[in-house]
Amino acid sequence: MPKEIHAYTVIKRPVVTEKSTALANASQYVFEVDKAANKMQIKDAVEKAFTVRVLDVNTMLMKPKRRRRGRQWGFTRAWKKAIVTLAPGDSITLFEGV
């Protein structure tokens, strides 16, 4: 049985990179989401938070990367990425006034 997660804690932050900005032109948006969230929970959270219609959700687990801080080696944290495809005509304004 999947863990029950509140809709507003599923989406952690939008991922803003060159690739995600290019995907936004094709009505696809990238978010960092809770690792325990499934595709249906992500779909419901995006629809509720942004009042749009979601057609498809693709998820992937991002592995931690090895990083160096001075002499010490460490790892970044692992996280889950979701690429959300919206219905034609729908869009999400991530940054207003910029």
Image (cartoon, rainbow, N blue to C red):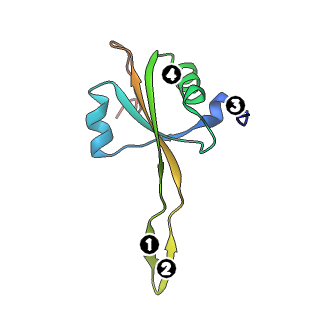
Q: Residue at x 49, y 79 (%)?
A: 73
Left or right side of 20 for 80:
right
When the figure is inspected, residue 72 is found, relative to residue 8, above or below; the finding is below
- As measured in the structure, the alpha-carbon distance from the residue carrying label 3 to the one carrying label 2 is 35 Å
| Left or right, residue 14 beside residue 88 | right
Percent across and percent down for residue 60 are 46, 44
**Residue that numbered label 2 is attached to:** 73
Residue labelled with disc 1: 67
- The tag earlier along the polypeptide, 3 or 2, is 3
Query: Callout 1: few (<14), some (14-19), or many (20+) C-alpha neighbours within 10 Å?
Result: few
| Image spot of residue 79 (x, y percent) | 52, 51
Q: Quadrant of the C terminus?
A: top left
Query: Upstream in the sequence, badge 4 or badge 1?
Result: 4
**Residue 83 picture location, percent across and down:** 41, 34
Q: Earlier in the sequence, mark 2 or mark 1?
A: 1
Mark 3–mark 4 Cα distance, whole angstroms, equals 15 Å
Residue beneath label 3, please?
Answer: 6
Cα gap from disc 2 to disc 4, whole angstroms: 39 Å
| Amino acid under disc 4 | Phe
Q: Which residue is mark 4?
A: 50
